[in-house]
Image (cartoon, rainbow, N blue to C red):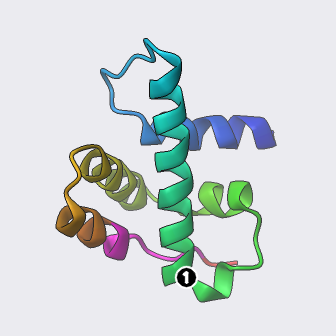
Amino acid sequence: MKKIHTAAFVACLMLPTVTMAAPLEGLKFEQQKQQVVKDVKLNCPASSGLSDAVFANKVLESAENKTAVQSATRALDKNDKAGYQKAIKSIQCPTK
């Protein structure tokens, strides 16, 4: 079950048309995923004790958060720091 939720988080972060054609693209995606989780956790101090996988799953329970996570990922990909920060700040912290 945990793997399914982690897979859902990974799928949510991917752009719909992205294909991992090269190993470096996979590495870039993993780095972006870790960056998003880290930055969202900074805005949600009450959730800091949760593992990254549990935290990510709780964040993605909300449709609005899924959209914001996708926006953050797109902004990271475009190196749009202002857009990234806006998207990260719009993510609602999960309740325990």
Could one spot residue 24 in this view of the protein? Answer: yes
Residue occupying image coordinates x 54% and y 33%: 27
> Which residues lie in the magenta part?
88-94
Is 65 situated above or below 20? below
Is 22 situated above or below 5? above
Q: Quadrant of residue 85?
A: bottom left
Question: Mark 1 sits on what residue?
Answer: 44
**Picture coordinates of residue 72 (x, y %)?**
32, 56
Instruction: Decide: few, some or many residues near mark 1? Use Cα within 10 Å; few <14, some 14-19, many ≥20.
Output: some
Residue occupying image coordinates x 30% and y 20%: 17
Task: Name the foreground residue: 78 vs 3.
Answer: 78
Q: Is residue 67 left or right of residue 60?
A: left
Is 45 situated above or below 23? below
What residue occupies the far bottom of the structure in this picture? 46
Magenta segment includes 92? yes
Residue occupying image coordinates x 51% and y 77%: 93
Could one spot residue 61 in this view of the protein? Answer: no
**Picture coordinates of residue 15 (x, y %)?**
34, 32
**Picture coordinates of residue 35 (x, y %)?**
50, 58
Q: Is residue 31 left or right of residue 67?
A: right
Q: Is residue 67 left or right of residue 32?
A: left
Task: Identify the secondary structure beneath mark 1.
Answer: loop
Task: Name the foreground residue: 41 vs 81.
Answer: 81
Amino acid of disc 1: Cys
Magenta segment includes 45? no
Task: Name the foreground residue: 66 vs 49.
Answer: 49
What residue occupies the far right of the structure in this picture? 1
Image quadrant for the N terminus? top right
Image quadrant for the C terminus? bottom right
Residue occupying image coordinates x 79% and y 43%: 2
